[in-house]
Amino acid sequence: MTLRFNDETFRGDYTYHNSAAAVRRFPFPFDQDSYMYSVNIEPHRPTRAGSVFEHRFDVDEHYVAEMQDRAITLADDPLRCQSLPHMELAGWDFLELVMVCKSEDYPDMFTLHRDGDRWHWINRPLGIDQRFTFMDTSTLPCGPLEYIGRQTQGDHALLDQREGNLWMDAGIVTSQADWSLDFNIGMNFFEWHAPVPKAHELGIFQRALKFLTNVQQGKPSRRLNWTMTVNPRLDTSPENYHKWGPEKRTITPENVGAKQYLRVELQSFYRLPRSNALVFPIRCYLISLEDLVTVPKWGRRFHRVLRDLPDELAEYKGFAVNRSMIVDYLARFDDGAETSAGIFPD
Ligand code: HEM
């Protein structure tokens, strides 16, 4: 295998770190010096070799550690993976999608042999060698969504499509930015987005839903979303707010560069073939401010974005309490020079 996996943690002693290469390929989400919600959806096609957009399901140096962290969260709280009875077929669709994409995109790490419904899956980084019968859950150690979700970075929501709406009827969610699958299960697109400020008035969700209900098989799309997290913690769930919420108070002007992280979600949308459900992978990337400013364009731009961000967004994203410290820190890396278009480093 060409990729080396980090030995690291996302809780406790927080030894998570990005290599220099991981910093360069970080999905910086701002293509200009200011930010407001928009329907920023583009085709999810391979873009830029080496970037997180090169493959359909990005596998990086954090893969093994992220899967270990997911196993800890699921052991503590099995309700982080749920599937309403009618979503079993969508779970199989999702398993197939991941196995096919990963074995095609990373043949050195993943292999899939198919002989009718007799399948053989090999996942070398996690040491898994599994023979099973496709669509027969009794041949896997758990349901298909949980089985492949434990081997795929990012959270995954499975959306049933009916009555012109999308319903969050299944998912595996252990690295979310302060929302709960257990709370949202069974809700529709407008219901689970209800807490988001400003976007409803801008008509964003009506347009987004129209787009999503028309996503075609084989034509996935993607968008980036972002928030801020203190310490490199994947599980920032409402269920565990008592564990990570108080950590916001540990930020000081001296440690803000090391402890404050930008959290970016690469979200994608795929139509599934048999169930007609949609799968929504939400892949989380974390970068400390001190790593981020090693790319001069990003340091300048991020300072301007956070300085000028509407208060409601800072409040909703949960960093209003530390905003001035963050902006002061970033100001040191903004010399006022112009920034180039696009998200990639110069
Ligand atoms: C079917 C796919 C989608 C799912 C499952 C989903 C799910 C969610 C959830 C659970 C939240 C957190 C809400 C809370 O505070 O409790 C959220 C936030 C949000 N969603 Fe979606 N979403 C989807 C698609 C989209 C699309 C296509 C857009 C495009 C505009 C969008 C825009 C947003 C925005 C702007 C936020 C606020 C995020 C922030 O400021 O950090 N979502 N979404």
Image (cartoon, rainbow, N blue to C red):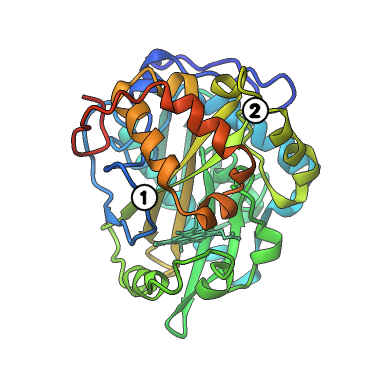
Mark earlier in primary sequence (2, 1): 2
Residue on which disc 2 sits:
10
On screen, 296 above or below 207?
Answer: above
The residue beneath circle 1 is 35
Please state which amino acid type lies under the numbered disc 1: Tyr
Q: Which three-letter amino acid code belongs to the residue tagged 2?
A: Phe
Q: Residues within 10 Å of mark 2 (few under 14, many from 20)?
A: some
**Could you tell me which residue is drawn at 43 percent across and 50 percent down?**
96
| Residue 291 horizontal side relative to residue 68, left or right | left
Give x and y (percent) for residue 334. 34, 26
Image vertical order of residue 178 relative to residue 336, above or below? below
Which element is circle 2 on? loop
Pick the front one: 84 or 119: 84
- Which residue corresponds to the image point at 50% horizontal and 28% vertical from the top-left? 328
Q: Nearer the viewer, residue 118 or 16?
A: 16
Question: Which residue does the image show at 40% across and 16% down from the upper left?
Answer: 1
Q: Is residue 11 left or right of residue 20?
A: right
The CA distance from mark 2 to mark 1 is: 28 Å
Above or below 281: residue 60: above
In which quadrant of the rendered image does the C terminus lie? top left
Q: Answer with the quarter of the image where residue 323 lies.
A: top right
Provide residue 189's location: percent of width, then percent of height: 50, 72
Mark 2 sits near ligand 1, with its Cβ under 8 Å away: no
Please tell me whether residue 166 is drawn above or below residue 57 in the rendered image.
below
Where does residue 50 sit, x and y in percent of width and height? Answer: 28, 26
Say which mark, if any, is on residue 181. Answer: none
Q: Residues within 10 Å of mark 1 (few under 14, many from 20)?
A: some
